[in-house]
Image (cartoon, rainbow, N blue to C red):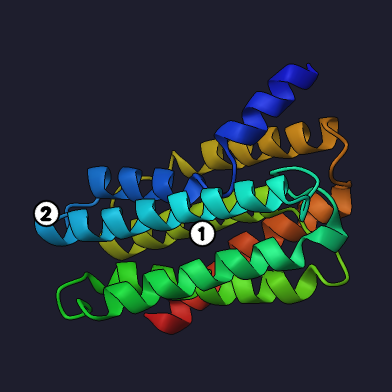
């Protein structure tokens, strides 16, 4: 079961979740994918930021700045979280130049993610909230938001997302890297935090 928990943790790593969300949304939301060139541009920027983050984490691991690539130790989280925050800020800055051509939903989503990561960075100084569950909660918030905004008919899919989040929570608990309160805070931060931010930014 531990092997299964590790597989689930890696498949649903918070680094990959934004990419999954992006690919899914452009496949179901005609409005977000109506300009293929713009969609490709945003996708490339997102992939480059993810790859840059992965390389930075590998370098930190090699220099022993972190004990593992999932940054399980709370005291080691500030630097890698700050690096992720910088890359997210660079993504927002990069797409800002094409803001006139990018659907407002994309821009609001990237802004919301940046603010949410800043809040998570501050929280992690004292408390090890689960980033895996924050990613799951944030993805659900984004799906629910775009579903409501563009009438995508995804209402039946959202409960499946909660089940998936529960599975990821089980995996993190099984690995012994998070307690139930840490999982709950991470999920609530992603779900409710991003919901409020998207509502305010739109």
Residue 185 image point, x, y percent: 77, 60
* Residue 108: percent from left, percent from top: 38, 74
Q: Image point 50% across, 46% down: which residue?
A: 17
Task: Tell how many labels.
Answer: 2
From this viewpoint, is residue 77 visible?
yes
Who's the residue at 64% across and 70% down the image? 82
- Label 2: few (<14), some (14–19) or many (≥20) C-alpha neighbours in 10 Å: few
Mark 1 surroundings: few (<14), some (14-19) or many (≥20) residues within 10 A: many
Q: Nearer the viewer, residue 54 or 147?
A: 54
Pointer 1 residue: 141
Tell me: residue 15, above or below residue 103. Answer: above
Towards the viewer: 57 or 88 = 57
Residue 193 at least partly seen: no
Task: Name the residue: 42% across, 53% down.
Answer: 143
Q: Considering depth in this image, is 44 or 123 the residue closer to the camera? A: 44
Name the mark on residue 42.
none
Q: Residue at x 64, y 29 (%)?
A: 8
Please provide percent x and percent y for residue 31: 18, 59
Quarter placement of the N terminus: top right
Q: At numbered mark 2, what does the secondary structure look like: helix, strand or loop?
A: helix
On screen, residue 20 versus residue 193, left or right, reads left
In front: mark 2 or mark 1?
2
Query: In the visual, does 161 lie left or right of 176?
Result: left
11 relative to 155, above or below: above
The label shown at residue 36 is 2
Which element type, helix, strand or loop, lies under badge 1?
helix
Left or right: residue 18 versus residue 41 is right
N-terminal of the two: label 2 or label 1? Answer: 2
Query: Residue 7: horizontal and vertical position, in percent?
Result: 64, 25
Eyeballing the image, is 71 above or below 8? below
């Amino acid at each position: 079961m531990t092997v299964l928990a590790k597989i689930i943790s890696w498949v649903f790593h918070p680094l990959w979740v934004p990419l999954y969300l992006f690919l899914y949304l452009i496949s179901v939301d005609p409005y977000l994918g109506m300009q293929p060139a713009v969609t490709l541009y945003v996708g490339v920027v997102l992939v480059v930021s993810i790859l840059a983050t992965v390389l930075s984490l590998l370098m930190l691991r090699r220099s022993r700045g972190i004990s593992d690539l999932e940054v399980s130790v709370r005291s080691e989280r500030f630097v890698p979280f700050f690096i992720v925050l910088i890359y997210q800020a660079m993504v927002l800055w990069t797409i800002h130049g094409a803001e006139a051509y990018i659907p407002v939903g994309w821009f609001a989503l990237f802004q919301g993610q940046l603010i949410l990561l800043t809040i998570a960075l501050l929280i992690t100084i004292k408390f090890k909230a689960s980033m895996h569950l924050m990613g799951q909660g944030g993805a659900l918030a984004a799906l629910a938001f775009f579903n409501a905004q563009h009438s995508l008919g995804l209402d039946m899919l959202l409960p499946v997302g909660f089940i998936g989040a529960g599975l990821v929570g089980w995996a993190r608990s099984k690995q012994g890297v998070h307690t139930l309160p840490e999982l709950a805070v991470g999920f609530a931060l992603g779900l409710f935090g991003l919901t409020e931010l998207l509502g305010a930014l739109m």
